[in-house]
Amino acid sequence: MQMTTSSSSPSYLIIIPTFFLLITIIPSAVISQQTPPPPPAPSPESNNCNGIFITYLYTSGSKLKPTQPKNQPYRFESTLTILNNGAEDLKSWRVFVGFQHSEILVSASNALLADGSSFPASVENGTVFGGYPMADLKTAIETAGDLNQMSVAVELVGTQFGVNLLTDVPLPNNITLANDAFNCPPATKLGKNQLEVCCTKDETVKTNISTGDEFLPRQKGDLTIMYDITKTFDSSYWAQVTIENHNPLGRLDYWQLSWDWMQEEFINTMKGAYPSVVDSSDCVFGTQGTYYTSLDFSNVLNCERRPTIVDLPLTMTNNTDLGMIKGCCRNGTILPKSMDPSKSSSVFQMQVYKMPPNLNRSELSPPQNFRISGILNPDYKCGPPVRVSPSEFPNPNGLPSNLTSFASWQVVCNITQPKGVSPKCCVSFSAYFNESVVPCKTCACGCNSNTSKTCSTTAQAILLPSEALLVPFENRTALTRAWADLKHLNVPNPMPCGDNCGVSINWHLYTDYKKGWTARITIFNWDETPFADWFTAVQLEHATPGFQKAYSFNATTLNTLDSGENNTIFMQGLEGLNYLVAETDSANPQKDPRVPGKQQSVISFTKKLTPGINVAAGDGFPTKLFFNGEECSLPSVLPTSGGNRKDLTKLLSVIIVVFVSVLLL
């Protein structure tokens, strides 16, 4: 007891001052974390700008390892500043920076990449920044000149290549405001390390935004995602997410939707969809587990910073725990409205838990960096969430009044053609006047990097006999060589690689006569995934007005041009025949190759509405062809009317010579 008493007395003398020291330090640390640094003083040139003043200031750079003289990497740091000197609020500001030195952006404060990319991101062709968390910039009039509300400074850190810091400062080629209805002249260089530009309102452009609007109007796009808060509590909220397709040729199969949580949120429960990975370990061992000590994390669905959400199968539609959401549970299929308006959207709900300091039912913020994809579908680029007017929903009790969300954000996604990304389907051409088929291009859908020793990735694909279209590429070698020998075709060594496409489509010019012509389209599925409710769309630059009928498909013409002209034939399977099966084993797998899923139809055209059309010379072949929204690779050459008939010509010559000789006898 004496030892305990004697040792405890000095401990209080030591611990008490330390305790009070911690108390005095912690509040100041918290304050320093929550108070954003003041924006830098605006450039003196901003005084001459009565619009949006943007500056890009290169602050520092340094050489990075490894040393590689031809493409040396350098670290760069710069500051992008946006100042609202105009008379109206700048809502959801967006600024384009024309990077031109193969930049890789590692971080950006107070901003996100508008295309939804996460850091680090390649921005070598320039990129658009969007504001986060401060998306709107107020005016000097309503803030009495408060720069904290009028401006934002974005600190950029990244890597650039091939520059020479000794002779020049590597600046972007331009900076400009990306918001609509603004005029921006080319940026002006100030000194060696700064660009600046003043963008003014274009009064000649009419927009549907009025000065008093609290929210921006909803925008149009190929696909939109609505993030609606339907219930809100201090520590959590319920959100309804609606994915809707607006493009007549766009669709998604087995869609996957992902985003970034910005404030340590996590998903507790869901209805109508599910995370691709159910894992709460990041919460258990993270700050969420420390704060929510009484929450059973074994029931929490996902704690990833970037979760991936997938649709539920049809069997879950009426499941009381996971389904019962109108528009859910379609196995990830979203169709064009022209096919079925009731299947052109997908809906799910989720309960999201928040973290301090956002524990207030009015503190609501959506995730960022949305990305959506499917299999054998178009590539989509999604912009940042934009606050819009609250969505309205029908009253579930059947009352004639609508319910509104507490807050709503819209994400607009558009179909893009990413650089270096190969198509996922390809087209072959054939015609009645040529026995050979022009096959899909070599590596039309990409080639494996390790195939160079066994096949050529650059050699042109060899003409094929028509029966080869039914055989998998790896089983075509003998047929191809035999046909090349018969037709005296050159066979490169090594032979060309295959097209590597999951779906291939043959367009065959079937007949051509005085008043009309016909074509036959055949779709082959070489993948292990079947396609329900498939569609294909064919663009014929000169022939579409003469379209009459597809005999085995449902077909109609679509307008995909601003001119209003119908230039596309949209085709889908008849009822009961709208399922394109996957590749399967043959009846004798030990002997015969696998068999692709196949759908086929003949299409008829009249020449009455297309005077002067030259079907055989090219007007009868597609200029673009789509399968399930994905634009397919087309051959670079067309079948010729005389190239492969020389064997027949020789044979006829021999017959004539023999016939003449007989007559002379």
Image (cartoon, rainbow, N blue to C red):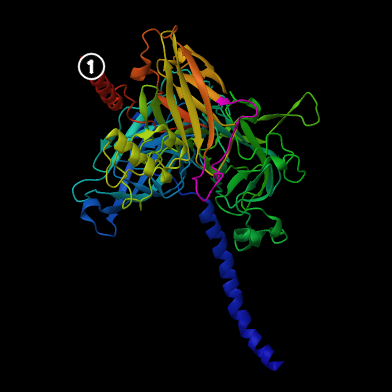
Point 24% across, 49% down: residue: 162
Quadrant of residue 17 in the image? bottom right
Relative to 45, residue 648 above or below: above
Give the residue type at disc 1: Val
Furthest-bottom residue in this view:
2
Question: Circle 1 sits in a helix, a strand or a loop, which is it?
Answer: helix
- Prevalent SS, magenta region: loop
- Residue 354 in the magenta stretch? The answer is no
Image-based side of 654 in relation to 569, left or right: left
Q: 235 or 643: nearer the eye?
A: 643
Point 37% across, 12% down: residue: 613
Location of residue 171 in the rendering, given as x and y in whole percent from the top left corner: 28, 42
Point 69% across, 40% down: residue: 314
User: Neighbour class for label 1 at 10 Å: few (<14), some, many (≥20)?
Assistant: few
- Residue 582 in the magenta stretch? The answer is yes
Please identify the quadrant where the N terminus is shown: bottom right
| Residue pointed to by mark 1 | 660
Quadrant of residue 84 in the image? top left
Q: What's drawn in magenta, residue-wise?
A: 572-595
Residue 532 shows in this picture: yes
Location of residue 356 in the rendering, given as x and y in whole percent from the top left corner: 62, 53
